Image (tube, rainbow, N blue to C red):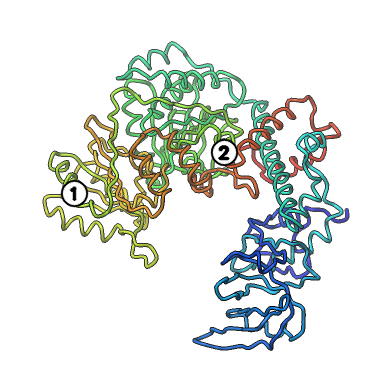
Amino acid sequence: MGQQLSDAVATLSGVGPARQKGLAELGINTIADLLTYYPFRYEDLQVKDVNEIADQEKVTLKGTVASEPVLARFGRKKNRLNFRLLIDHDVYMVTFFNQPYLMKQIETGQDLAVYGKWDATRSSLTGMKIINPNNADSAFGSIYPASKTVKQGTIQKMIKQAYELYAPVITDIVPANLRAKYRLLPRRQMIHDMHFPASQADSTAARRSATYEEFLLFQMQMQVLKQTDATTNGIAIAYDNDRLKAFIKTLPFELTHAQKRVVNEICLDLKSPKHMNRLLQGDVGSGKTIVAAIVMYAAITAGYQAALMAPTEILAEQHANNLAQVFADTDVNVALLTGATKPAARKTLLAALAAGEINLLIGTHALIQDGVTYANLGLVITDEQHRFGVNQRAAFRQKGGQPDALAMTATPIPRTLAITAYGEMDVSEIDELPAGRQPIQTTWVRSNQANSALSFVHQQIDNGSQAYVVTPLIEESETLDVKNAEALSANLQEYFGASVKVGLLHGRMKPEEKDAVMAAFKAGDIQLLVSTTVIEVGVDVKNATIMMIYDADRFGLAQLHQLRGRVGRGTKASYCILVADPKNQQGIERMQIMTQTTNGFVLAQKDLELRGAGDVLGVKQSGMPEFKVGDPIADLTVLQVAQQDAHAIVQQPDWQSQPDNRALAAYLSQKLAAVGTLD
């Protein structure tokens, strides 16, 4: 077989089991992973003229060592290495801190290139590393994301070794016609210039080619998954339209235009024999749950079972209670299954589910565990989609014969980004709020004005309302000057006195403790709840009218918006108070926009512009792909072009066997086999 990019990194010299484990933690398992482990920045190692250097600029100076190196030790484990460098008849002092081993590399009379930070007032250089000018691979030093176990230098050496050994087997993946159209570099050169650019222009051209390649490969995966999904036989759910219309008429309110449109989109998908894979986006309070209820009822009228999975027990329980009321006068049999379900009750429930007696099951990830068998599952809905991993969603779909899948999220993702995160899904949006929803008045105060805000909170509580107070941290932190939840709850209890019961909720509490506190708040036994963001998603307390958020500038806009959405769920006027002392202009802008709009989609777009995709969605849990080079915000145009190109490729009949696409098809089949799922 010879060498292949799919070879394990262990084939390189110096990679034993410990290093292999460290590399795996960085996502590097194969030679291909290593070669596409791109630098996130470069150090300019080109030798500069002393007269052209700005103060504090990082530069490389080249000269002759003009004095013996002197090592001075001071303090515990601290030392300073000094020597003089002769450059064009002038002598400059070079200092290295805490690198005593460099003594051996410095000899009087030797030519030396040193990379470091220039101090213009002292005409001296604080050295960072010594460069062998005859051996430099390029004029730019590549800087990689490293870890405690795998250091920067190790990554650099391994990439150099891998490139030297495997360059001959690096072949193009992007079809030749697209490479010509966009003037992209051949893949071998692109990889070389990403790691070892000779100039700024080389690195820019390589990054441009790498960004397009990465986006095209991602979009091809999305298109292939979508195509496979469409051709996979789903279920044609022939629901009873008359019964569905009659059910909608029994609802105590008129659906908004947006809700009607979305219900129609989903019902069309249900009827179709193609497999549905749809994302339903709706801002906080836009009425996604009732849309879910309507489409689940549609599936049930056709004799199918429906399941709704929520990320927490509190939320699952809330859905079960609300839906039991919605379906009170129908033949829908609602059941709740969570980790808290007692063994005896669970056994009875599972038997009824397998027999088809339960036609709507609501719960947490307990719904997809082994031993949970459905008689005839037709529709699965996941609430707060981004809280579930790919494998959990896939396991859900395997519970039935390819049941239709609907994912719901209240984390507004601008449509431009939705094509990235959920490129294989169709997207529906509820973009208006139901009539009668109270607008939430948002104000921003500095921390020295917090007491006047608290007196307003006291008035509201005296008038019979309840309040949330949110803070970012749980316990003392030396590095962050933030109010922690425990200290804050004690202070507030003292401030409000015995007439107000203050509760505390944070992430370190056991689930049953959290549930007990939340139940007491819902029942009105606790008037003011101090919490970290564990109350963020979906919990519904209609009597809560105030959301006060300390250190609000430490949260993203999307998260602040989610928190704000916890109030204003009843008929009373509601308020959100942001307490923050932002340190920079961006922080001030974020506080101002929160007071100017309650539209989650506007906020999400603004958050993307200010912070980038990874921060907004919390990449690790969002299902957002992590790109190595491309930035879905900054490079959005490239992303959209790549999507159009990918779409055009898969529309061609028998595209895989066309000579230009063979390398691309081979790459995808390998990639999709590794994923092992169409989700």
Q: Any mark on residue 41, and which?
A: none
Residue 297 left/right relative to 118 = left
Q: Position of residue 528 (x, y in %)?
A: 22, 48
Quadrant of the image for the C terminus?
Answer: top right
Q: Which residue is mark 2?
A: 421
Give the residue type at disc 2: Ala
Residue at image point 61% right, 83% down: 81
Residue 137 left/right relative to 628 = right
Secondary structure beneath dot 2 equals helix
Image height of 231 relative to 591, above or below: above
Image height of 146 relative to 585, above or below: below
Secondary structure beneath dot 1 equals helix
Q: Nearer the viewer, residue 597 or 651?
A: 597
Q: Position of residue 312 (x, y in %)?
A: 40, 44
Q: Earlier in the sequence, mark 1 or mark 2?
A: 2
Q: Which residue is mark 1?
A: 452
